[in-house]
Image: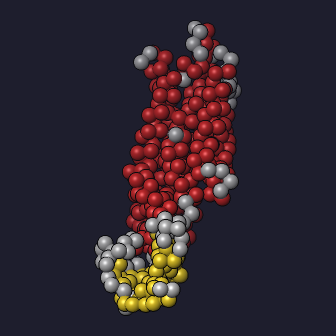
Amino acid sequence: MRTIDRYILKQFAPLFLIGLTLFVLLLQLIDLFANLWRYLAYDASVLDIARVAFYYLPKCVSYSLPISLLFAAAYTFGDLYARNELIIIFATGMPLKRLGLSLFVLGAALSVASFQFEDRVVVRAQKAKKEISKALLKQQRSSNEADVVVKSDAGRLVYSVDYYNDTDKTLNGLSIVERTELGGFERYIQARKARWTGDSWTLENAVEYRYSDGKLVNAPYAQTGEFTERPETFRRNSLEVEDLPARDAAGFIGDLRAAGLPTAGALADYYRRFAFSATPLVVLVLSVAVGGRFRKNVLLMSLLASLVASVIYYVFQMLSMMSAKLGYISPAAGAWAPAAVFILCGAVLVTTART
């Protein structure tokens, strides 16, 4: 590593750690004061509130990482410009893109680390935080579902359930329509109740209807263990992609697709998991491009630029995700469009900056 790279990182690191600490503290305080009156109303102890804050900490780090990087890099280059050090560096013939190379490499490394951190730590911690918060605020939600309709096996099987009991893993008032590959009627099965045995459903008092010689006939259904749709399928409204690790989220989307349910929203959230991990690289490219343009009021201008850029980025991301979930654009485009646009703008600004 060249001397100039070490010098840039030495100036950058303390600012980044200070910014990360301040932004994490700010997010913790916002969450605390937003829910404090609820905690007090339900007599939550200080220890319970501290547990909620502890499990919210990884998510705060995830949210604070991009804006902290943006602030630290913008301030570093702005301070170098204010002290006329950039003039000396540029006089040697070094372009801005080479000067920011160490931060670009750092951004790429942090992007990879950010995905692993989000997938292995943040998801689990956020799930625990939600469970503790719901328990403290008496907001527990039942996993039971009523009037459920599920398609399976590419639409060949259609389940209609009056009531799914998640505690007992039972289906009450079950009707199953089996269709041929061409979509025609194959058979109809009706059962008072079905119970999950661990690998298949056992139907109680089930009757099977088929056409024979042009007439609809019925007979008691013989248990064959052929219906293996997992119980989670009948309560999937309580699941969210954001609460699942990437591998489980991919399996969940596959289940949605196999059941014939909409997947646009889930796919958009799944792709966003990868797109959001690229944010450190995006903000560092952008901050290097704009950081050297501040000569006066460096601290204030760097902080202001960081906040403005972050707001624009997250609003753009919100709009693109909404468009993807409504079907106006593809899920992949909705997740990756903000990162692609911002890194392109940053790259243009870096390459065209006057040095």
The quadrant the N terminus occupies is top left
- Could you tell me residue 308's position as x and y percent? 67, 42
Looking at the image, can residue 282 be seen? Answer: yes
- Could you tell me residue 19's position as x and y percent? 53, 40
Instruction: Say left or right for 44 vs 82.
Output: left
Determine whether 53 is above or below 175 in the image: above
Viewer-side residue, 6 vs 324: 324
Q: What residue lies at 50% left-to-right and 36% top-to-bottom?
A: 16
Instruction: Say left or right for 51 vs 282.
Output: left
Viewer-side residue, 83 vs 75: 75
The quadrant the C terminus occupies is top right
Picture quadrant where residue 79 is located: top right
Determine whether 79 is above or below 258 in the image: above
Q: What residue lies at 44% left-to-right and 15% top-to-bottom?
A: 2
Q: What residue lies at 41% left-to-right and 46% top-to-bottom?
A: 117
Q: How many numbered badges does the structure rendering display?
A: 0
Instruction: Say left or right for 333 vs 191.
Output: right
Picture quadrant where residue 200 is located: bottom left
Looking at the image, can residue 43 be seen? Answer: no
- Could you tell me residue 313's position as x and y percent? 64, 44
Determine whether 319 is above or below 223 in the image: above
Determine whether 227 is above or below 342 in the image: below
- What is the basis of the colouring in this image? secondary structure
Residue at the limit of the structure toward the top, as seen here: 92
Q: What residue lies at 50% left-to-right and 61% top-to-bottom?
A: 257
